Image (spheres, rainbow, N blue to C red):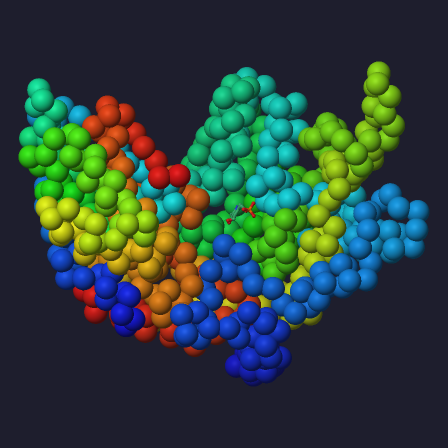
Amino acid sequence: MPSSEKSQTASIMYDIEAIRADFPILARTMHDKPLAFLDTAASAQKPRHVIDAVSHVYENEYANVHRGLYQISEAVTVRYEGTREIIRDFIGAAHTHEIIFTRNATESINLVAHSFGRNFLSEGDEVIITALEHHANIVPWQMLRDEKGIVLKVVPITDDGELIMSAFEDLLGPRTKLVSVAHMSNVMGTILPIKDIIDKAHAAGAKVLIDGCQSVTHIPVDVQALGCDFYIFSGHKLYGPSGIGVLYGKEELLNAMPPFMGGGDMISSVTFEKSTWAKLPHKFEAGTPAIAQAIGLGAAIEYVNGLGLDAIGAHEADVLKYATEQLSSLEGLRIIGTSPNKASVVSFVLEYAHPHDIATIIDRAGVAVRAGHHCAQPLMERMDVPATVRASIGLYNNRTDIDALVRALGEVEELFG
Amino acid sequence: MSDDLRELYQEVILDHGKNPRNFHLHDDATNEARGNNPLCGDQLVIYLQLDGERNVVDASFLGKGCAICMASASMMTDLVKGRSAEEAQSMFEAFHDMCTGEGDETALADNMEKLSVLSGVREFPTRVKCATLPWHTMVAALKGENEISTE
Ligand SMILES: Cc1ncc(COP(=O)(O)O)c(C=O)c1O
């Protein structure tokens, strides 16, 4: 099939109007203007399918999981555990017990820092991160550094926002125990060459954690093909509820790691002398979990799978290209993050107005963006900006949203230009 | 454009934002403090020169921030010059109340009337801190504290 025909079938199949109708919130207004929601990288809106799945649990089959010896509890346990299989399949893991539920990506990273970091790293061992990490992938390692005396090393980036691979190779050494990097930058959209990073880290004998918070919503992931040791993400950015996150870890590593928290559900037996741990995945899931949220996340992945990540990615790439073109044509606007390898995020600054003022003005025009440092202060410093405006694109955004943004920026120019 | 936006971004504010007064380092400062708004990354330093009676002889600032923050710092440094530390403190309280809606601009003393142009922030709860950050920082400097954060 010639490629033009192919993209046409893709756009017929990707019925953006029907998809938008799946998201009830998109029908509302903000300040009496149609809502142009361009903040999906912070948290995504939820489709009806997810909202219904969560309501269904509470209306029909809510009880605690793993405990009740009655029909409802058994049914909800099956649904809850079934979500693990949906996630396993989504990221290509070998086993469902390699899927650990957490509260969010931040907790997933902290779990690894506590359980793996505290027990397998010692003074002088090195952890490598990059200059574009979210605070969630910086601070836990600094805390470990202060506690254990490990050394934290940072791979620099180019002015375009790309990782400098040669610098990464130079930082890798015999003491490198862990490489912890984002798959995709939440500020610039840059997609990192993680396969290459993983292979080189493994060759140096280091384990690898991939922060997939931003990437899982745009790029198909296969953790076995990648070979990473940990892959983590949050449910709320993947069109699922907040309060649920995922840690994928290789079975043998997870087995070797001690529990993160102690309590109910994570034990096999308890006496006052000694307790023994439950098997994976429950060893890492102390206490009553986020039951409806996990089931909601399963529904979100079903929804995303129904559209297909390839089709979603193609649609978003089209909107991103349009946004980049439209924004670049505005005088005094500079895009932060210009790697050709990027997805779904466009950060920018205006010569004549501060990001905070921009966000306030365009909010009144119905446009939701994020302005600030995006939990990536070291990156702001590197790019020499105090803050940026970030417009991020989800599977439901269209060119109309971008037009609303550009029109609203006209009002900023009217005031400040 | 909505009226509350025009109210927020009045000419005076835009002018102070673009051409801030007293925007420089101060070699003779006796007190200085740094203010951070971690939410948006705004940072500024307020410099005060106090005499033996704790009168503010001179005031200046440096930093990066939004138009509201810069305008507020610019006007504030103009206003506190020549006041006693006590007066500066009570100006802060009146201004703070105006911004949060606990007081209104009519409650401002005559010498503070100029600040009423900033009363528009009341309609923008997320922006109140932008207006008050310079004042919080100034009060910290008066007290001899070196750093404050709005969160
Ligand atoms: C790359 C990246 N890592 C980690 C996080 C933290 O996610 P959460 O706040 O859901 O734990 C985010 C969210 O902003 C992110 O974008």
Tell me if I can see residue A260 in this picture: yes
Check the image and report above or below for A342 versus A382: below
Please state if A259 lies on the left or on the right of A199 as rendered. Answer: right
Tell me if I can see residue A87 in this picture: no
- Residue at the location (58% across, 68% down)? A312
- Residue at the location (63% across, 49% down)? A243
Q: Quadrant of the N terminus of chain B?
A: bottom left
Please state if A341 lies on the left or on the right of A222 as rendered. Answer: left
Choose between A139 and A294: the one closer to the eye: A294
Tell me residue A256's x, y (percent). 75, 28
Please state if A71 lies on the left or on the right of A95 as rendered. Answer: right
Q: Quadrant of residue A329?
A: bottom left
- Residue at the location (44% across, 69% down)? A30
Tell me residue A38's x, y (percent). 45, 64
Tell me residue A377's x, y (percent). 38, 41
Choose between A388 and A335: the one closer to the eye: A388
Choose between A162 and A73: the one closer to the eye: A73
Choose between B66 and A340: the one closer to the eye: B66
Q: Quadrant of the C terminus of chain B?
A: top left
Tell me residue B83's x, y (percent). 10, 34
Check the image and report above or below for A275 versus B69: above
- Residue at the location (89% across, 52% down)? A74
Q: Count numbered badges in the picture.
A: 0
Q: Quadrant of residue A50?
A: bottom right
